[in-house]
Amino acid sequence: MGGPNDQIPAAYARSLHDTTYAYLRALNKTTEKFGYLTKDLARNGTLINNMSKGEFQGETGNVILDENGNREPIFVVTMLDISDQPLNVIQINFINNTMQITKNYNDEAVIWANRGGKRPLYKPICGYTGTECPQNITTYILIGVGLVLLLLVATLGGIGYAVREKLKEKERLTRECLIPFGELKNLKELKSNEDMRSLEANKSLKSLQSSQSGSTKLTSMDDKKLETENYVHFLYNREVVFAIKYQVRVRIFNEDLFQLMKLRQLDHENLNKFCGLCTDAPILYAVWKHCQRGSLKDLIGKERYVGDSFVMFTLMRDIASGLIALHRSFIGAHGMLSSENCLINDRWQVKISDFGLNMIRESQTITKRKLLWTAPELLRENNRKGTKEGDVYSFAIICCELVNRETVWNGVEREDDVDEIIYRLRRTNTAIPHRPQLHPREEINQNLQYASSLEQEVEERTRELVEEKRKSDILLYRMLPKQVADKLKLGEFVEPEQFSAATIFFSDVVSFTTLASKCSPLQVIKILFEINYELKRL
């Protein structure tokens, strides 16, 4: 530890102090444990190592001893701060052979305060040899940024164009499928208008007149036929249409607009033409083409025209044909087929109406009387979209109406009876019977194809006839004066005319015989026509 005159202890004096202190501390614990201390106990290394386990503050710092008497080391990383004062920044402890690192700083800039707060590179930018300098990639970066910007602009432009086209498509669909209320003129309000006199010649308007009075004037018609609780008649694009009233408001989405457009384009001789929806009116309207003779239910109620078997067969055939067209289209099924929406036009042709508007039908309240044509399984499931089998059931009910010459369920009128019928239909637990599917006969398809080809051939022959007539008129006008030719074409007699004086012109074609011998007959005729034409001009 040094001589008696040494003022500074040796470097290991502190370690010797901590070792002695640890040994004496272990002897104290041994005495406390056994109550006595002997020479053997003091020299028992295993026992002393065991008793030395613990922690105390020594001259060399915090001393931690394990059960084997080994000191668990503590390493401290010390540096000089900007004031050249020692600063402990990291402490490393080994506890049970596990290293624990404790950082005594919150910001790494404290360690590198003398270097501007930045950690030095572990390797120079150009390497230790100066040959690893990175290439200048500024040009590549600029090109990459330009390409990215160009791609971004192109993407944004494409998105903008797609959005614009989508908005234009939506506007077009809205314009085609949604009818502004201002374009619908209420016939009930126009009835007393003077302008209606010019419209009474319209065939559609004439059909609305009262059949009982026999009058052809619209002013004599009962207002009840122009507007009822369920529908109203309008004038739209100079044609009479009828609009079904809906007491609900539905939101029309893009897919609904596409559905309405397809519904508007659906065309079949036994399907009524859909004109569009009117959503800006006081109530929602579904506008359909007007059929002059009303519904099949009205016809059956009048007990006229349906007594003949051929008429019944024709009406049934038209309904079946319309159902086949519906089942083969995107609609799939009618769902609410009845004699009320089987309309009859002026040619006694059945037109099925009120189909394809499921987005409205699902929200609309349906009266129980309208359910009298609905199949029992659809009543139990509360299915308003309908099925093909359910349409066949409704078609069978309509056929029964035609055969019995009575409206549905023998003309039931009382609401209690209607409720009883609906209740019993829903309560039926029998299995759904087999209902045949509707298919067109091949002969009918062949006849339709033949009629279509025949119509095309007639149109082609008509065009040829018009062309030949035009050519013959040109030739006739060259041969005869126009006024004479027109009278002859009309079959009129051309009166001879007398003139007090006339001039006769004689001409001769020099060497005509020689010239004609060198020409073909058609060339000779052409020469004579040209000479005659030039003489007329003179």
Image (cartoon, helix red, strand yellow):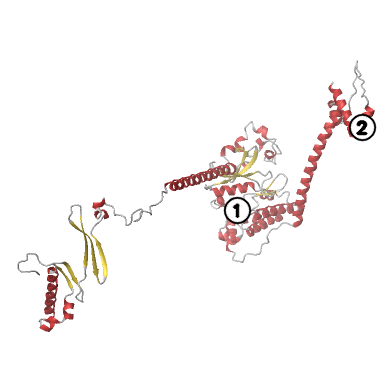
Where is residue 131 drawn, in percent x and y? 38, 54
- Vertical placement of residue 509 versus 97, above or below: above
- Vertical placement of residue 55 versus 406, above or below: below
Return the residue found at the far right: 513
Name the residue type under label 2. Lys
Q: Is residue 127 left or right of residue 241?
A: left
Where is residue 344 drawn, in percent x and y? 69, 47
- Tag 1 secondary structure: helix
Where is residue 371 drawn, in percent x and y? 60, 55
Mark number, residue 370: 1
The residue that disc 2 covers is 518
Location of residue 178 by image quarter: top right
Name the residue type under label 1. Lys
- Tag 2 secondary structure: loop
Residue at 6%, 64% (x, y): give it. Answer: 7
Location of residue 403 by image quarter: bottom right
Chain-order first, disc 1 or disc 2: 1
Q: Is residue 401 left or right of residue 109?
A: right
Residue at 4%, 66% (x, y): give it. Answer: 5
Q: Is residue 480 left or right of residue 216?
A: right
Residue at 18%, 52% (x, y): give it. Answer: 83
Residue at 23%, 67% (x, y): give it. Answer: 93
Mark number, residue 277: none
Which quadrant: the C terminus?
Answer: top right
Which quadrant: the N terminus?
Answer: bottom left
